[in-house]
Image: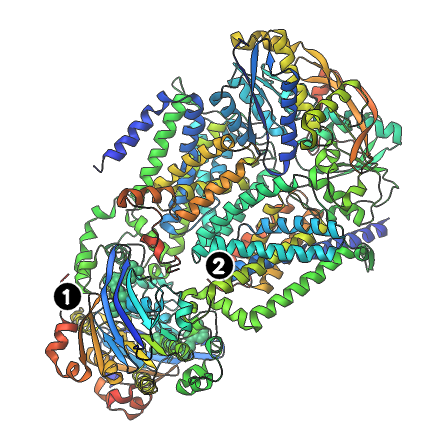
Amino acid sequence: MANDPLLKVEDLHVYYGSSHVLHGLSLEAGTEPLSLVGRNGMGKSTLCQAIMGLVPAARGEVRLGGERLNGRRAYRVARAGVGYVPQGRRVYRSLSVEEHLKLVGKPGGEWTIERIYDTFPRLAERRKNGGGALSGGEQQMLAISRALLLNPRLLVMDEPTEGLAPVIVDHVVEVLREIGRSGVGLLLVEQNLSVATQVSDRIMVMMNGEIALETDAESLLNDRALRNRYLGVAAEA
Amino acid sequence: MRWILPLAVIALLLVYPFVVNSFWLVQIGGRTLGFGTIVLSLVFLTAYTGMLSLAQMSVAGVAGYATAYFTAPTSGVGLLLPWPLALILALGLATVAGLLIGLVAVRTRGIYTLMITLAVAMAFYFLTLQNYDLFNGYTGFNNVQPPVILGLDLGANLPFYYMSVVLAAACYFGVRHVVRTPFGLALQGLRDEPDRLRALGYNVPLLRVLAFGLAGFIAGIGGILNIWLNASISPGSVALNPVIDVLMAGVLGGIGHPIGAYIGAFVFTVVDNFAIDFIARERFNTLIGLIFLAIVLFSPDGLTGLVHRAWTRGTGWARRNDGDARETDDIGK
Amino acid sequence: QDGETITIGGLATLEGPFAAPGEDGLRGVELAIHEFGGEIAGHPIEFITASSDGNPDVALESARRLVEQDGADIMVGPLSGSEGIRIAQYAKEQPGTTFLNGGSAAIETTLVDPAENFFRFNTEGAQWTAPLGEYVVNERGWDNIVIVSEDYSFPYAQIFGFMATYCEAGGTVADKYFTPVGNNDYSSVIAQLPLEAGEIDGMYVVLGGSDAVNFLSQYAQMGGQLPIVGGTNVTDQTVLTTQGPARELLPGILSSGPVSDNDDLEAWEEFKQLYRDYYGDEGLPSPSLFASNYYTNTKAALLALQEVEGDLSDNHAAFNEALANLEFTSPTGTVSLNENRQATAAIYINEVVEQEGGSLALEPLERIESVDQYLGLDRETYMELGLPSRENPSCPS
Amino acid sequence: MIETLADINWRLFAIVTLNGLTLASLYFIVASGFSLIFGLMRVVNMAHGSLYLLGAYVGFEVSEATGSWILGILAAGVVVAAAGAALQVSILSWMQGQDLRQALATIGVSIVAADLMLAQWGGSAYQIALPEAVSTFVPVPVAGRYAMARLMLIGFALVIGVALWLILNRTRIGMLIRAGVDDRRMLEAMGVNVPLVFVGVFAIGAGLAGMAGVIGGSVLSVSPGEDARYLLSSLIVVIVGGMGSIPGAAIGALLVAMAETYGLAYTPTYGIVYTFAIMVAVLAVRPQGLLGRAA
Amino acid sequence: MQAARQTTEEALAIEGLTRRFGALVAVDDVTLRVSAGERRAVLGANGAGKTTLFNMIAGDLPPSAGHIRLFGEDITELSPQKRVLAGVRRTYQKSLVFGGMTVRDNLYVAIRGATGPRLTIWKRAENQPDRAQTDALAERVGLTDRLDTMANELSHGEQRQLELGMALAHPPKLLLLDEPAAGLSTRERESLVAMLADLPRDLTLILIEHDLDIALKAVDYVSVMHNGHLLAEGTPAEISANQDIQDIYMGRHGK
Ligand SMILES: Nc1ncnc2c1ncn2[C@@H]1O[C@H](COP(=O)(O)OP(=O)(O)OP(=O)(O)O)[C@@H](O)[C@H]1O
Ligand SMILES: Nc1ncnc2c1ncn2[C@@H]1O[C@H](COP(=O)(O)OP(=O)(O)OP(=O)(O)O)[C@@H](O)[C@H]1O
Ligand SMILES: [Mg+2]
Ligand SMILES: [Mg+2]
C-alpha cells in the first residue's frame, strides 16, 4: 500500500443523463501539486465532484492512497481525507463566518481557526457576518478556509481564486505553495494560468472530458502555440 | 408519427360515450374533465411558475358557489340572473379570487406558497361553513342545473360530456399555447430566477398575480363543470379532502406537463371509486394512500413521466438520476 | 332460486371520524338481509357497499357508482344529514331505483319537495328531541336554560324539535351558544356559562362525538355542575365508548332519541340478540342507533319486496306502493309512513347508566309513541314555523 | 347590577386570556416539532398530525396499562420519535432536497396512517387520565380559580421552547442542522454524516409531536380527525411566526390561539376565520413570517 | 481634469451614496461621475463595497443615504424595473440564469424584457418577429452551439457567458458588469475583451473586475474603492503607478 499514489483516477466515465461528460479519464497525483486547466465546459468541475462522490461515476475508479473512494457517500470521502473547495463557493448562508470555521475546525491540526484568521484577516473582521452577507471574494476566502480546516491529505480546489483581488490571489498562491511543500496533495483547477503555474510544476490540460496534454509549467508559459492549441482555439463542436 | 397519439386521443374521447355506461360517462368521464381542469390550473401554476397553489379547489369553489348563487337560489339566498350573465360573473369572480390569492402569495415561493395557499383554502372553507348570507352555511346549494340552450339540455349525460370535452380541450390547448408565448416564457423565468427576471425589466409581482389570475380562470371553468356534475355545492366541496385531492391527482398524473392533469384526474377518480372493490371495505383508504405513495416514490414526475420514460427509452422506469430530477436528487447512494 | 337477483346498495360513511357508526349501519343492512335468508320470493339478494366521507359530493359519487355502475335496484343510505338531502334529490333522477334512508336525519330530506321514490323509515332529528323539551319542563321543573350547540343544520334541527315542545310547555331560553364545527377548545364558551344551577336551571348540549367529550370534560374541569341534557349525539355510541376519565361524566346525562339500549320491548330484545349472535365480538356491545336505523329501513324494503314477490317491474311501481303503505314492527316498535314517506315512530327519553362490566348504556325513562314529522302539530302550523336555523326558533324569556 | 356585570366581564376576560395562553402552549408544543423539521430540513411534514395522533394513542395505552401518566408521555415520545426516524429513513431520505415530493409523500403516509389508526383505535374519543396532583384548581386573581392541568401546559411549553432554542443556537448540532439546510451536499463534502443528522432531527421533531399528543389528549381529548386539525394549526403557527424560528413559533402560537379563543368567546360565528385572517395579514406584510428570515 | 470631462453629457452621477449593514458601512459617502460613452472600471479589494455600489445603482438595494442620477434624472427612488427600462442593465457576480429553459429562451426573455411588449399572450415566441435576434446575441457571447441546451446543464463558465448575453440583450445606456471574466477560461476572456471593445461607443460601461489584464485594458478611467470609500481615481496608467494601490490591491501584479 505504501507505494500507492495519493490520488489515482482510472478510466473514469461520468454521464449527466445521456450526455457523456468524462470519457475514461485517468490521472495520478502524489504529494506534489497538480494543476488542471482547460476551457469552459470541458469537465473539470465534473471530475472534482466525481472524486468527492457528489456525482456518480458510471465506470472507473477513484482511489486515495489505495483506498477506493467511489461509491462512497461524500462525507466518507471527506473523512478519508479529501478537502474540497467547490466552484461557486457554496458557503452556508445562515451560518456566520465564525460558525463555519467552528463547524469543521478541530483543535490540534495543522490548520486552526487562529491561523485562518491570520491568513485572511478580512474574515476575522467579518466573523459575525452570515455567509450570505459576505462579498463574493470574502465568500471565496471562507470556502478555502473551510477546506483547509479539515486538515486533509488531499485538497481538491475548483477555481479557488475566482473573484479574489490580486493581492489576495498572491497570498493564496503562497499558501498553496506552502501546502504543496508540507506533503498535502493538491489538485488545483484553475483558469488563471499564472496561478496554476506558480503553484505547480505539473500541469494537465483537459479537453472534452479527457486529459489532452500533460506538461510542465515552463513549457506552457513559454509555448504560445501550445497554449493556443489547447486553451485558445475553439474545439470542434 | 407525432400526430398518431393526439388523433387517437381525440377519437377515443369522441367514441367514449358509446362504449360505456352512464356511470363511466358522467361520473368518471365528466368528472375527469371537470376535476381535471381544476388540476390543470394547479399544474399550470406549478410547472410554469414554480408556485404550488393548494387553493385551486377553493377558486373552483368560488365559481361553483357563484353559479349556484346566481342560477339556483336556495332558502332565500341567491339572486336569479340569466345564465350567460351568471356564468360570466362566476368566471369573473373566480379570476378575481385567483388574483387575490396571487396578491396574498405574491412574495412567497415554492413550498411556502403551498402552505399559505393551503391556509387560504381553509379560511375559505370555514367562511362557507359559517356564512349563511352568501354561502348558505353548512347546507350550501342544491339543484344547480346546467342551462337548456335551444332545446338542448346540457344537463343530459351526452351533451354534458361533450361540453366538458370541449371546455377541457380549450383549457388544455390554451395552457399549451400560453406557455410558449412571451408571457409564458416570462413566467418560466419567474420560476427559475425571479431576481434575474426583474433585472431584465419585468414586473415580477405583477407576473405572479397574473399567473394566479389565469389559473383562477381555468379553475373557474373546472369549478362550473364540477358543480353541474354534482348539482350541488357545500362546504364539503371545498374542505381539506377535496383540496388535497387536487394535489394528489396532479402528482399522480405528473405535475410537469399539462396532460398530467387529466391523466391524474382520471386515475384518481377510478382509484377513488374502485379501490373499495380491491380490498376489504373498511381499509380501502390505505390502498389509495399506498398507491399514491408508490407513485411519489418511484416516479417523481407521475404517470406521465413513467410513460414518457418507458416510451423514449423502452427500458426500466427505475432508472433514476436522469432528466430534471438530477439536481436535487440524492445521488450516489 | 329462479328469480333474478335483486341488488341492494348500502351507502355509509366508512372513512374518517364517522367510520364506526357507518360500519355499524351497514351491519344493520346485512343483518336484515341475513334475517330473510338472503332471498325474497326466489330472488337472491346481493348486497354491495360504497363509502362516503360525510360530504354530499362524495355521497353522490358513491350513489351513482352503486346505481349506475353496479346496478343497485334498492339503495339504503346515507348516514349523515346533508348527504341525505343530496341523495333524495338524486332519487328523482333515478326513478328506476328505490331509495331508503340510512341513518340520515335532516328535516329537509322528506319535507322540502320530497322524492316519490325516497322512503325514510326512521325518524329525523327534530322528532328525536321533541319529547325531551316537554319532559324537562314537566319532570325536572326547568323553565330557563342555556343551549350549547354546534353550528350547523343537524343541531339546529335538534334544537328546533326540543324547543317546539319546551317553549310550548312554558320554558324560556336565556342564551344559545353556537360553536363552529372544528373547534375543540370550549373553555371560552364555558367561561360564559353558569357553573351551578341558579337563575339558569340547566343546559341543553347538542354536540357530537369527540366534541361532546371535550365539552363535558372541560366543563367539569372548570368545576361546572349545571344539570345537562343532551342532544341525541351526545349519548351515541362514539361518545359512550369513550376511553378515559371523561367516561365518568356521562352517567346520569339525559337525552332522547329513536332507540334505547336497555329497552325491554320484545322487538328490541330480539334485534339485540340477532345482532349479537351474528356479529359476536366483531360488533358493538349493543347495536347503535345507526345499526337500528339502517336495519329498519332495509327490513322495510325486504318486507315490501316480499309483499310484491320481488316484482320490480314498471319502475318499481308495485314495490313503491307497498312501501308507502307498509306498517311493521321495527326494533323500536311500530313504524308507519306519512304522505311524505317519512316515518312516524316511538321516541325514548334516555338516561346514561353504567352497566355491569363497566360499559355505558342508554336506559329508557319514558317511551313516547307515534311521534310524527309535524311533532304533533297540524301540518299548517308546523310549516309556519319555517326551517330551523341559528335564530329559529327562539323563545326569549 | 352594573357592578356585577362589570365583574363578570373582567372575570370572563381573564379566563379567556388564560385559555388563550394555554391553548397557545399546546399549539406551540405541536408546532415546534413541525417548525424544527420544516425550518431546518425544509421538509413540510404533512404527516405531523398523524404523529400527534399516534402519540396520543400510544400515551393512552401505556398510561392505562401502567397507571402512570409520566410513563405514557415518555413512551409516546420514544415510540413516535422512532416512527419519525423510520419515516425519514425509509421514505424521505430518498428524496432529500425535493421539498414538494417530500410533502406529497408525507400526505400519502398520513392517509395510510389515519386509516390504520382508525382500524386500531376506532372512531371514539380517548382521554388520558392526568395525575391526581394536577387535577385541581389554583386560585388566580381576577379569574377566580383555574385548572391546574391547563396551567401546567404553559410550563411544558416554556421548558420545551427554551431547550429547543438553546440546542439550535448554542450547540454544534444546531450549526450542523442549519448548514445542512443551506447546502446539504456541501456539508456532506465537509465530512458530516448528514443523513444521520437529519434522522436525528426528524426523530426529535416527531417525538415532540408524540408528546404533544399525550398532552393534548389529557387536557382535551383525541379522536380521528385531530391529525388534520393539528397539522393545520401547526402550519398556520409556523407560517405566521416564521419557518424554523422557535421564538417565531411561540409568537405564532400565541397569536393564533388568542385569535381563536377571543374569537370564540366574543364573536363565535367567525372566530375561526380570524386565525386565517391574521395569517393573511402577516404574510401580506412579512411573507417570511414575523421572525422568519427572508427566503 | 474633472472639469474637462464634464463638458460631455453626464451618464451617471452619484452623490454621497452610503449603505450601511448594521454597524458596517459597506459603501461610505461615495460621489462618482461617469460621462456618457465612458468606460470605467471600479477596482478594490474584496469587500470594498463594489457590488453593493452596483446593487444600489441597479435598484436591487436601497441606499441608506445619497442620490443617484441617470442622465440628469434622479432615479434614487425608482424601482429596479423602471431603471431597466431607463437603460440600466447589469450582470451578477453569481450567475442568475433561467435553469429550466433553453439558452435560446433565456436570451429571448432578455430581449423581450429590454425592448418589447413583455407580456404578449396571443402569439407564440417562435412566431414573434424579434425571435431571430437570439442567434446574433448568442454569437456575441460564444454560445451559438449551445442554443438548445438547458441553461442548468451549462458549465459554470458557460453560465457566465449566458449571464453576459442577457445583459447585452438590447444595447443598454448604462451597462454594469460585475466580474464578467470570473470563471471564464483564457480563450473566453479574449473574446470578452474583443466584445467589450465592440460595444457601441455611446454606451456607458462600468466594470468591476479583478483580472487586471482586462480591467486596465478595457477602460478609460478607473475608480478605486477601499473599505467603502472612494480611494482614488485616475487613468489606468496613473492607477498602476500608484504605490498605495499596488500595496492594498494589486500586489505583485501591479509591478
Ligand atoms: N447538471 C448538468 N446537467 C447536464 N450537463 C451538465 C451539467 N453540469 C455540467 N454539464 C455539462 O457537462 C460539461 C462539463 O461541465 P463542467 O462543469 O465539468 O465543466 P468545467 O470544465 O468545470 O467548466 P467551467 O470552466 O466552465 O467551470 C459541460 O458541457 C456542461 O454543459
Ligand atoms: N447583506 C449584508 N449584510 C451585512 N454585510 C454585508 C451585506 N452584504 C455585503 N456586506 C458587507 O459589505 C462589504 C461590501 O460588500 P460588497 O459585496 O459590496 O464587496 P465587493 O467590493 O463587491 O467585494 P468582492 O470583490 O469580494 O465581490 C463586505 O465586507 C460585506 O461583508
Ligand atoms: Mg467548472
Ligand atoms: Mg463583489
Q: What colour scheme does the image use?
A: rainbow
Q: Nearer the viewer, residue B277 or B17?
A: B277
- Using a 10 Å C-alpha cutoff, classify the residue at mark 1 as few (fewer than 14 neighbours), some (14 to 19) or many (20 or more): few
Q: Which residue lies furthest to the left in this view?
A: A225
The residue under label 1 is A235
Q: Nearer the viewer, residue A1 or B54?
A: A1
Dot 2: element: loop
Answer above or below: position of B329 versus C84: below
Name the quadrant where ligand 4 sits.
Answer: bottom left
Q: Which mark is residue C169?
A: none
Label 1: chain letter: A
Side of C152 where D85 appears, left or right: left
Answer above or below: position of D36 versus E129: below
The residue under label 2 is D42
For the C terminus of chain C, give its image quadrant. top right
- The residue type indicated by label 1 comes to Ala
- Mark 1 C-beta to ligand 1 under 8 Å: no
Q: Quadrant of residue D97?
A: bottom left
- Using a 10 Å C-alpha cutoff, classify the residue at mark 2 as few (fewer than 14 neighbours), some (14 to 19) or many (20 or more): many
Residue found 42% across the figure and 78% down from its top: A150
Q: Quadrant of residue C153?
A: top right
Residue found 40% across the figure and 73% down from its top: A80
Residue found 19% across the figure and 83% down from its top: A217
Label 2: chain letter: D
